[in-house]
Image: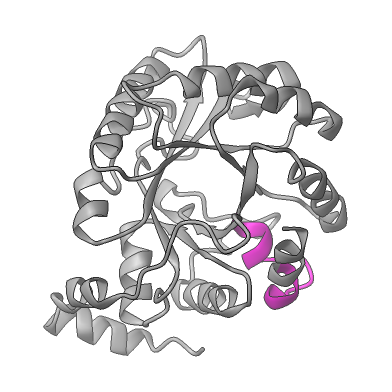
Amino acid sequence: MTVDIADLVRTRTHRPEAIAEAAARRVRRPLLNAAGRLMIVAADHPARGALGVGNRKMAMANRADLLERLCLALSRPGVDGVLATADILDDLLLLGALDDKVVMGSMNRGGLQGARFELDDRFTGHRPEDIERLGFDAGKLLLRIDYDDAGSLTTLESTARAIDDMAARRLPVFVEPFISRRDADGRLRNDLSADAVTRSIAIASGLGGSSAYTWLKVPVTENPDDMARVMETTTLPAVLLGGEVGDDQDSAYEKWRGALQLPTVRGLVVGRSLLYPVDGDVAAAVDTAVGLL
């Protein structure tokens, strides 16, 4: 699909109500596919100022290019849906790309990449009432915890309340937890050791007054062999997050393949590594990831 930016801007300028109309007529589907699995393409990075992919610092800055990559990914067999912020989902609604797809709204994007306040990750994206009003299927939130940063406590509390609000609406919410710390240069780093991922899962699983609608979005640990022990920490259903995989895409696929065999792991949520693969072949990258399920 070739995206006509001028046409999107015309619609947004003269008929902004077209977005709500497109959401109202969207064909919906169950969260999980017939095999009980979930394959989601993620594109909520730009709203945190995270535009880089590998050594391309502004790879995600071209909106027409990003939308074309997303439409291609969503058209591939086995792709169940998309995770994004309102601006991107609104564009995809206008493009008619979300019929019969799972739509997940990204909820907290206030912890801007590289900011001093990065761990005070305010809920500046979709609210539970927005997800309900638009007929979307789920929400996602990021929970980074640094024991040395008071901003993490603010994020913990607001995360718990968001989980409560989603549960009250019987809407699934995918919580992406990390134990994080700043390096010598002040940059935030996520700890992917088995102990840290285990601790983050334990903390996230206990947030809110009900866990009935809580899912986890978890990374593969530094040593993939530790994943079986790590995932014993909870009975909540989980999906794997992709993250950046660098040049060794095949190694990342093998890590995902092993973790996908665990009983709590129900699918994948992958973004930049599928939308901007090293070889440029989006369709092939997506098809390979789908094949892992």
> In x, y percent, where is residue 129?
19, 47
Q: Residue at x 57, y 23 (%)?
A: 201
Of 258 and 195, which appears nearest the observer?
258
> In x, y percent, where is residue 144?
50, 27
Rendering quarter of residue 206: top left
Q: Is residue 281 magenta?
A: yes
Placement of 75 over or under 62, stated as above or below:
below
* Residue 130 horizontal side relative to residue 158, left or right: left
Magenta-drawn segment: 270-285
Q: Residue at x 33, y 75 (%)?
A: 93
Placement of 75 over or under 121, stated as above or below:
below
Q: Residue at x 30, y 83 (%)?
A: 8
Q: Is residue 18 magenta?
A: no
* Observer able to see residue 207: yes
> In x, y percent, where is residue 237?
56, 37
> In x, y percent, where is residue 264?
64, 37
Looking at this view, name the residue that lies furthest to the front.
Answer: 34
Number of marks in picture: 0
* Observer able to see residue 184: no
Of 15 and 194, which appears nearest the observer?
194
Rendering quarter of residue 152: top left
